[in-house]
Structure formats: C-alpha cells, structure tokens
Amino acid sequence: MKQTKIIMGMPITVEITDSKYTTLLADTFAFFREVDNRYSTYKDDSEITQVNNGMPRSDWSDEMKTIMQLCEETKQATNGYFDIRHDGKLDPSGLIKGWSIWEAAKRLKKRGVKNFYIEAGGDIQAQGNNESNEPWTVGIRNPFNSDEIIKVLHVKNKGVATSGTYIRGQHIYNPHLPQDELHDVQSLTVIADNIYEADRFATAAFAMGQDGIAFVEQQEGLEGYMVDDAGTATFTSGFKEYAYA
C-alpha cells in the first residue's frame, strides 16, 4: 500500500509492500508530524523556535541535544561546509529530513517490516524489494528539465539524496562564503547505506561546488553523481553499480 501526505511543507510518500504491515502507514505519518512540530522554524511553539528564543540548554529535550550533537559532528566531518547557524539562529533542517526518514525506517524495521520505501521531498530510503520483488527504482532528474529522468538507479537497503537549487532556488549556501550564490553545480546525488548519511553529505558536498564530487569519492560507503552548470555529469568510481540508464 502506498500513501502520500503533505507534512513538513513537502510531500512525504510511504509505500509498504509487506501486506500485513500496511496499518503502520498511519503511525509513520504521525511520526513525521511529531518531527515537524518539534523542529519547524516556522512554528512559534516548536522546540527549535524556543531554542532560538533563548530556551536554556538544560530545558532542551534529549532528542534536541542529540540532533545538535549530530549537526556538530557533521560540521566537523565536512570541514565546516555543513553549518546550521544562519543569521544568528539555529536551523537543523539540513539534517532533520534525512534523520527523520531514517528514524521512521528504523521504526518500521523494528516492527518487522522488510520491504518499504519512504520518500520526503526527493530524499529516499529504499528497503528490501518493491511489489515486483525487485530492487526499488529511483530516478535522478535533469536539473535543467525536471520532467526528464537522466539516470535510473536500482537500490535495495540504501538511501538516496539529491541536493540542488533547481527546484527550491538558492536555499543552500557555502558557509565559508555565505554571500556568494552557488552556480557552478546544478545537482548532486549521493547514495549511502541509509538516507541520514546520504542527505547530510549531499547537502555539504553541494555547498562545496565542483569539489563536492571529489569529497564524496573520498568518503567510505558513499557514491555520487554531479551535474554541473555546463550540463556535464561527473560520478564516483562505484556509482555505475547502481545505475541502469
């Protein structure tokens, strides 16, 4: 069974192909609503808004402390290219999407679900097989024509995340040069063992510009595909293992 809901300001799709577990769809969407209520910087009563309004660290939830620690670890792992501080405020949304998909996936796995697919705003966790008992199919869009798929991936037990500015505009920036818009790369896709890893490193690698694909190549367990401003594609050495078109 497959359902899509608008949560966190984006379409979230959950598909469970293990028929006896389809009742867990509602639980999964409820989890995403909890995440939105806690981390949305657009909600006046969210915990992250309260943090930005001066809530003492001693009053933060344990989960918030964990998220902030993960953000700091990611900042260190990416040489500062992943940074959640913007104009004096904290915005962990660059980590929250991938983290929440992976947490939702882990919850399903703990309940015994083996075959499912979660997509939130283009970031994907593909677990097990699809309804045809084959690996899940994931398309990489042409950043110059979003109606066109330029690569088809077949993935199983993997996370796939794409960062770019061709849909949402300039929402990613280089923390080292925050006033400069990013133009030399149009999209950068990362494949990892889970969507948390794929998403956080895709965001940071995109902020690095054309150096991002080399950064992905150097990371153990990551593969990537980059399309630059000239329309040239560059990919990591192991990417072809997943590409079928």
Image: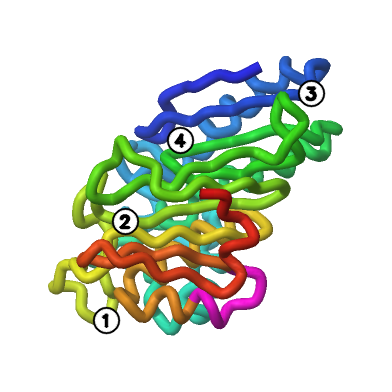
Residue 97 at x, y percent in the picture: 48, 47
Number of residues whose C-alpha sits closer than 10 Å to that of mark 4, classed few (under 14), some (14–19) or many (20 or more): some
- Please give the residue where the numbered disc 2 appears in the rendered image: 164
Number of residues whose C-alpha sits closer than 10 Å to that of mark 3, classed few (under 14), some (14–19) or many (20 or more): some
Residue 6 at x, y percent in the picture: 41, 25
Question: What secondary structure is found at the residue carrying circle 4?
Answer: helix
- Please give the residue where the numbered disc 1 appears in the rendered image: 176
Asked if residue 48 lies left or right of residue 143, the reply is right
Foreground disc of the pair 3, 4: 3
- Please give the residue where the numbered disc 3 appears in the rendered image: 18
Magenta region: 216-222
Real-space Cα separation, disc 2 to disc 1, in angstroms: 18 Å
Q: Residue at x 51, y 46 (%)?
A: 152
Residue 96 at x, y percent in the picture: 49, 51
* First reached walking from the N terminus: tag 2 or tag 1: 2
Foreground disc of the pair 1, 3: 3
Real-space Cα separation, disc 2 to disc 3, in angstroms: 33 Å
Foreground disc of the pair 2, 1: 2
Q: Residue furthest front?
A: 245
- Please give the residue where the numbered disc 4 appears in the rendered image: 37
Q: Amino acid at mark 2?
A: Gly
Indicate the quadrant containing the N terminus: top left, top right, bottom left or bottom right.
top right
